[in-house]
Image (spheres, helix red, strand yellow):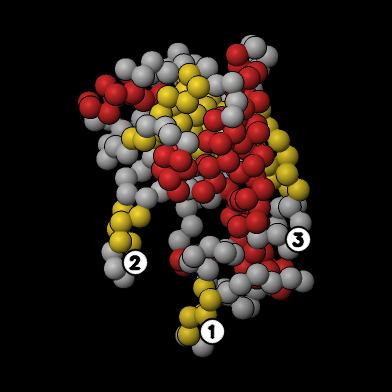
Amino acid sequence: MKLVFFGSPEFAIPSLKALHYSSHKILGVVTVPDKRSGRGQKTTSPPIKKKAQELDYPVYQPLSLKGNNFLSIINNLYPDIFVVVAYRILPEEIIIIPAQGAVNVHASLLPKYRGAAPIHHAILNGEDETGVTTFQITKNIDTGDILLQENYKLTKNITTGEASQHLSILGANLIVKTLDSIVKREIIPIKQDNDVATSAPKIFSRDCQINWNKSAKTIHNQIRAFSPHPGAYTYYHNKRIKIYNTKI
């Protein structure tokens, strides 16, 4: 199939590479705009942009996904499907463009942990298993029909950073398998059970503060969940201290 890839962070790179070496054709890569960061306000590009340029794909960085210019560009690519891995919410105007719609790779076993930070929340809650899911994107976030899933065991000492690396590779393999299966008409989409759904909202710096009155297990899970998250700090006698991996 001919596809347009939407993604931004490191998590999306294995999926882009896997699709590059698959039988499917990537027409272009859509990512977020470059931004200025750090003391020197240097312009930095999203990781997926660098990889897309290495692989010689056109890169699009629209400020608005609803802009007429961007919609025209994407329409004129005549994609069969969109593949989304760790990107912003797609508006309905985008989703309806390809005949096969849009497919997302999500780092949880949906309908558990819908939202922006599924790996963080799975580890924070002490789960011993998570996984990756491919599903059809609809206008409601992370609620579309499930296509394929793969389970992944979480050890008691694994961190979000480590799990993210493993899950990004599982997701890459799963998205290729998903597209192959769509072409062969081997997938029967499964509706999500909203009654058992859980949420995984965006992480904020306040979530990284440790309450030392909680149990050792709870604190351990919190440290694992936010390592090596850049906001992973604890507070001791009002002094901010960076936290690193711990083991019990």
Closest to the observer, 85 or 36: 36
Q: Is residue 43 left or right of residue 162?
A: left
Q: Which residue is mark 2?
A: 38
Return the disc, 1 or 2, that comes first in the chain's sequence.
2
Q: Which residue is mark 1?
A: 236
Mark 1 and mark 2 residues within 8 Å of each other at the beta carbon: no
Q: Position of residue 4 (x, y in %)?
A: 44, 26
Q: Quadrant of residue 168?
A: top right
Q: Which residue is mark 3?
A: 156
Residue 223, visible in the rendered structure: yes
Q: Is residue 151 left or right of residue 24?
A: right
The residue at 64%/64% (across/down) is 224
Residue 90, visible in the rendered structure: no
The residue at 51%/88% (across/down) is 237
Q: Position of residue 48 (x, y in %)?
A: 45, 43
Return the disc, 1 or 3, that comes first in the chain's sequence.
3
Residue reaching furthest to the top? 185
